[in-house]
Amino acid sequence: MAPLPRFLVAVLPVVAVAVSASLITQPNILAWYAGLQKPGFTPPNWAFPVAWTILYAMMAYALWRILSLPANRPGRRAAIVAFFVQLVLNGTWSFAFFGGKSPAAGLVVIAALIVAILATIRTFWRLDRTAAGLLVPYLAWVAYAALLNGTIWRLNA
């Protein structure tokens, strides 16, 4: 794959998920999320877009590294599929939690997302350890978000 298409395949889907998640999240922050009981370890609202911007950039770069490998490299296709599975789940979480105004549904999706991220890291590790390492902060943030999601669900059930 030529450099420009490879770059676009790595960046555009990640940007699409980021934008769609933001479009569903932003209107619900003041309208719904602000009224929820939240734990003391909840970060300020401004921290979320900062963290996600950095994480999405790292995710796109990790995918770009995998896409840069020879197309016939064993495991490459599985790694790309794993990446896109977790990316879809990433976007789905915003629709479940914020769009559906359902911490319970969000918790189900985020649990599946963690499993999918772990699978992606595992498949990336076999091909490019740097690409796998780029996803570790993402896994840590999503694990923290899962704790936050679960606590919000418990406090507001």
Image (spheres, rainbow, N blue to C red):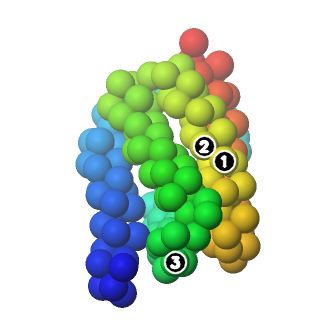
Percent position of residue 111, x then y: 63, 32
Residue 116, position in %: x, y? 60, 43
**Quick check: 47 above or below 103?**
below
34 versus 3 height, above or below: above
Q: Residue at x 44, y 31 (%)?
A: 97
**Residue 122 falls in which quadrant of the image?**
bottom right
Q: Looking at the image, which residue is at 29% across and 58% down?
A: 16
| Residue that badge 1 annotates | 119
Can residue 153 be seen in the rendering of this structure? yes
Q: Position of residue 149 (x, y in %)?
A: 60, 33
Q: Quadrant of residue 131?
A: bottom right
Q: Are marks 2 and 1 in contact (CB under 8 Å)?
A: yes
Query: For the point 52% across and 70% down, which residue is it?
Result: 72
Q: Is residue 137 visible?
A: no
Label 1 amino acid? Ala
Lateral position of residue 97 relative to residue 19, left or right = right
Circle nearer the N terminus (2, 3) = 3
Q: Is residue 149 left or right of residue 35?
A: right
Q: What residue sits right under mark 2 in the picture? A: 116
Residue beneath the point at 65% across and 19% down: 154
Q: Amino acid at mark 3?
A: Pro
Which residue carries the number 3 mark?
A: 70
Give the secondary structure at mark 1. Answer: helix
The one nearer the camera, 146 or 59, is: 59
Mark 3 against mark 1, which lies toward the viewer?
Answer: 3
Of 23 and 70, the residue lying toward us: 70
- Picture layout, residue 127 above or below residue 32: below
| Quarter containing the N terminus | bottom left
> Which quadrant: the C terminus?
top right
Packing grade of label 3 (10 A; few <14, some 14-19, many >=20) is: few
Task: Classify 10 Å Cα crowding around label 2: few (below 14), some (14-19), many (20 and above).
Answer: many
Q: Earlier in the sequence, mark 3 or mark 1?
A: 3
